[in-house]
Amino acid sequence: MNKLTTNNFPNNTFHKLLRVLKYEVLRLAYNKKYFYMVLIESLFASYILTSFVSGGTDGTAPFSKWTYSEFLSLIGPLLSVILVLLCMSVFSEKEVAVRNIIFSTPLSEPEYYLLKALAITVVFVFAAFFPLLLSFVYYVRYFNFYDYAEFMLPLLLFLLPSQIFVLGLSLAVGRIHSRLLYPLLPLVLFLGFFNPRLPSWFDLFGNNFLSWPLRWHLGVQEGPIPYILPDDFLYSRLIFTFMGVFMFAFACRKSKT
């Protein structure tokens, strides 16, 4: 009976794609710029934890959902800056030479950009992991708090939609022209660290919403402040998420020429 060879298996292509993805992840992660970005983000998260989180938000406990939401809204802009910088590497001039190597594998243009986006996502998750881990360690160390499941909803509302939107926007803008990515950096910082009293539909990181006194804004005069967000704010999170996914699909499209 003839022995089967690995060439007979269609998953050879899948393994090649995994190798390409691994190569892209390592290429993005193993450089000084990425190390410095993660270091700055971690130091900033430590500053936020010790300066703002310890006092709680509007009289709520430091380990309340409201306080953790504010923590996420403060670290979110720098995480988005990391995303934009990672996306810049996809559309840089140096990428052209690497692209020729990538295209030596059986990759279509949409698959190429999909792999790029996946590599950026993996590297970004590692970057976001460090400030989140610092926050968990902080809560254990100072408050003996272990119920991290309480923070899942704030993560889904105050961190995930904004990062999906910025990733999709950065990839879509980069496909149009790489230089258009540069104005995104000051725009992200402006939306993240200034409070121009924008409505919920433009409140990307939720910092404008949290800058209002919660009791006054939510109409709660006495007792604990329930973690109930206004409908327009919740709808805006969905819109940011869907827009990010749509722009991601646009970035991964096949060129007409």
Image: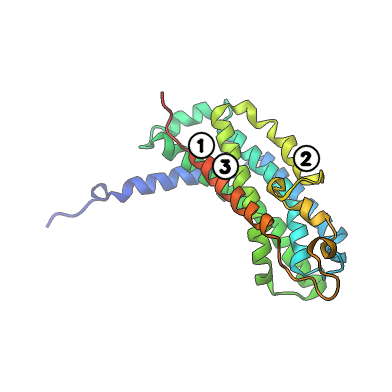
Q: Position of residue 137 (x, y in %)?
A: 74, 67
Disc 3/disc 2 C-alpha distance (Å): 19 Å
Task: Report the disc number at residue 24.
Answer: none
Q: What residue type is labelled 2?
A: Phe
Q: Position of residue 226 (x, y in %)?
A: 75, 71
Q: Where is residue 28 in the image (x, y as percent from the top left)?
A: 59, 41
Give neighbour class at mark 1: few <14, some 14-19, many 20+ (Cα, 10 Å).
many
Which residue extends farthest top?
257
As displayed, is residue 16 above or below residue 60?
A: above
- Whether residue 39 appears in this view of the structure is no
| N-term mark: 3 or 2 | 3
Element carrying mark 1: helix
User: Which quadrant does the C terminus fall into?
Assistant: top left
Task: Report the disc number at residue 251.
Answer: 1
Instruction: Please give left or right for residue 21 compared with residue 238 in the image.
Output: left
At x 71%, y 74%, the residue is 146
Element carrying mark 2: helix
